[in-house]
Image (cartoon, grey):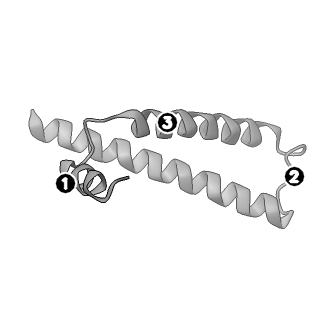
Amino acid sequence: MQRFFGAFWTFRDLFWVLALGVLLVFGFFLALGAVHPGQMKWPTIGVIALGALWVVHAWLESRSAARRDPRLVHARERRGF
């Protein structure tokens, strides 16, 4: 069962990395002027929805205290930050 959950977390992280890649590629082509959002209505809506999901995911991950390395927290507190 632990192997299944390990694979699940790996695929979940892979999805979010690929989602960020799609957002960056779309933004790159948008900046170049090769993509016109008005002409590509549905892909633009999909990328905006994916961006909103990624922002929510990043916000939830930043608030998760369970994944923080205690050594880093201790080092930060030792430095006075």
Looking at the picture, does residue 48 appear above or below residue 77?
above
Alpha-carbon distance for marks 3 and 2? 29 Å
Quarter of the image for residue 49 reads: top right
The tag earlier along the polypeptide, 3 or 2, is 2
73 on left or right of 4: right
Q: Which residue is mark 1?
A: 71
Amino acid marked by disc 2: His
Secondary structure, mark 1, is helix
Q: Which residue is mark 3?
A: 59
How busy is the neighbourhood of tag 3: few (under 14 within 10 Å), some, or many (20 plus)? few
Which residue appears at 81% of the width and 62% of the height?
Answer: 31
Which residue appears at 25% of the width and 57% of the height?
Answer: 75
- Circles 3 and 2: CB atoms closer than 8 Å: no
Alpha-carbon distance for marks 2 and 1? 47 Å
Q: Which residue is mark 2?
A: 36
Return the x and y of residue 36 as percentages of the image width and height: 87, 52
Looking at the picture, does residue 59 appear above or below residue 40?
above
Amino acid marked by disc 3: Trp
Kindly report which numbered mark, 3 or 2, lies closer to the viewer in this rendering. Answer: 3
- Circles 1 and 3: CB atoms closer than 8 Å: no
Kindly report which numbered mark, 2 or 1, lies closer to the viewer in this rendering. Answer: 1
Which residue appears at 82% of the width and 56% of the height?
Answer: 35
